[in-house]
Amino acid sequence: MAAPVTPGTPAPPTPVAPDDLTREGSQGLSDPPSEPKQLPELIRVKRDGGRLSEADIRGFVDAVVNGSAQGAQIGAMLMAIRLQGMDLEETSALTQALAKSGQQLEWPEAWHQQLVDKHSTGGVGDKVSLVLAPALAACGCKVPMISGRGLAHTGGTLDKLESVPGFNVIQSPEQMQVLLEQVGCCIVGQSKKLVPGDGILYAARDVTATVDSLPLITASILSKKVVEGLSALVVDVKFGEAAVFPNQEQARKLARALVGVGAGLGLRVAAALTAMDKPLGRSVGHTLEVEEALLCMDGAGPSDLRDLVTKLGGALLWLSGQAEAQAEGAARVAAALDDGSARGRFEQMLAGQGVDPGLARALCSGTPAQRRQLLPRAREQEELLTPADGTVELIHAMPLALVLHELGAGRSRAGEPLRLGVGAELLVDVGQRLRRGTPWLRVHRDGPPLSGPQRRALQGALVLSDRAPFAAPSPYAELVLPPTGAQQ
């Protein structure tokens, strides 16, 4: 059965077959009992294009978690998977092994329909989770969001939240239940108790050039969600030059893999395809993105961010049976942004996860200027000017992300500290008419002035045209849904 899509979107091709995640693959993972393979042998099998059994995959994950796998072996296996792929059964087995590497979360039965979550494959300026989790809580949901850190050029939700002094991303399952009872949402990281296997692989992928592996992405995302006991999950699958996947068709393959593997694991998953050629919103960088998320929760802020928050939230409320239609759900999320209830839940979440209540209150009730005084700031600011008259056709996200990474906003190795105040503010919008000499970008930096190559890279991100001003399109392109039976 073809996966349905929202009205007005192109119908996706037939759902992914079990071996569509790699060039070759056979059905099923049932193997005759045999002696457990040693890690070098497992790596060799996958390196040479073979299939790993469920026991093989479980053995690899066990070795990762118990420390017997060396860092070089973990990196070699990740690269073998990246180059040779995994079929759907292998991906499902990896997802289950990672999910079972730690404690399973258990919630009151009465919560089941309310338990929802969202995950993003990563983008530039993507602060949707910071807004959506408290907005959904304000709509009556329970959102036990297990999130991640920055990968490659993309920022991580946990890193952004840690720019708020005192915020603690490590919460025990018992603490998570209290937060869900009292606030309705929490945003936490993997720990030794929660999906520890994925925590190790996630950090290793960031520094081994294996971020863009479809089966590794699928298993990483879904393993964190399987342990949450959700009613519904929406995954924001980015496509474009600053996304893991450069075009919508490749992103759709991941979307169908997520929906298919999720259905096999009893998880109702929908996947939104959203464009990531330009930054989302106007701010890039940890502190700056927290400020922009708060602006969205003021009922203001950039229209593309608000549009994505409301559409993804509407899909979740509909998919979990808490709204009659996606549009009705989106309207409820928008109301939570406009009436201050989402911001109120965000304040409660900050205080519940270690932020001084006075600081949480000041952040959520203050003006944008007051908020900036409360969060880490870069030492210097530097503006770039528009080189000619013209209409902003596009602002390429990738050059911004790469320069900010160089300035300390990203990691080159796992565990490396970040410069939380480093970032950039877009001072103009796509579609806007500009005059030569107009400031279009403000860079927040801790170090010396931008180098010549950095300035040239940033100026090259601004694309001007001669056409008349226009309204920028929404980044939201398509929603791939589970089979009809799985939505009930």
Image (cartoon, rainbow, N blue to C red):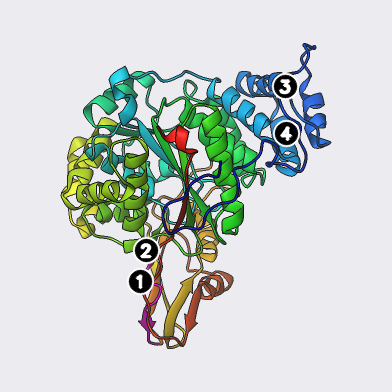
Callout 1 secondary element: loop
Label 3 environment density (alpha carbons within 10 Å; few <14, some 14–19, many ≥20)? many
**Residue 428 inside the magenta-drawn segment:** yes
Image position, residue 240 (x, y; %): 55, 60
Q: In the rendered image, is residue 268 in sight?
A: no
Instruction: Say whether disc 2 or disc 1 marks the residue closer to the N-terminus.
Output: 2
Instruction: Say whether disc 3 or disc 1 marks the residue closer to the N-terminus.
Output: 3
Q: Which residue is drawn at the image coordinates 28% and 20% (left, top)?
A: 110
User: In the image, is 345 to the left or to the right of 406?
Assistant: left
Determine which of the numbered discs, if any, sits on residue 56 in the image. Answer: 3
Callout 4 secondary element: helix
Q: Which residue is drawn at the image coordinates 31% and 63% (left, top)?
A: 303
Contact flag, marks 2 and 1 (Cβ < 8 Å)? yes
Determine which of the numbered discs, if any, sits on residue 77 in the image. Answer: 4
Residue type at the position of mark 2: Arg
Q: CA distance from mark 3 to mark 2?
A: 46 Å
Label 2 environment density (alpha carbons within 10 Å; few <14, some 14–19, many ≥20)? many
Residue type at the position of mark 3: Asp
**Residue tagged 1:** 427
**Residue tagged 2:** 282
Q: Which residue is drawn at the image coordinates 55% and 35% (left, top)?
A: 220
Instruction: Say whether disc 4 or disc 1 marks the residue closer to the N-terminus.
Output: 4
Q: CA distance from mark 2 to mark 4?
A: 38 Å
Which of discs 4 and 3 lies nearer the camera? The answer is 3
Residue type at the position of mark 4: Met
**Magenta range:** 426-435
Instruction: Say whether disc 2 or disc 4 marks the residue closer to the N-terminus.
Output: 4
Contact flag, marks 4 and 1 (Cβ < 8 Å)? no
Callout 2 secondary element: loop
Label 1 environment density (alpha carbons within 10 Å; few <14, some 14–19, many ≥20)? some
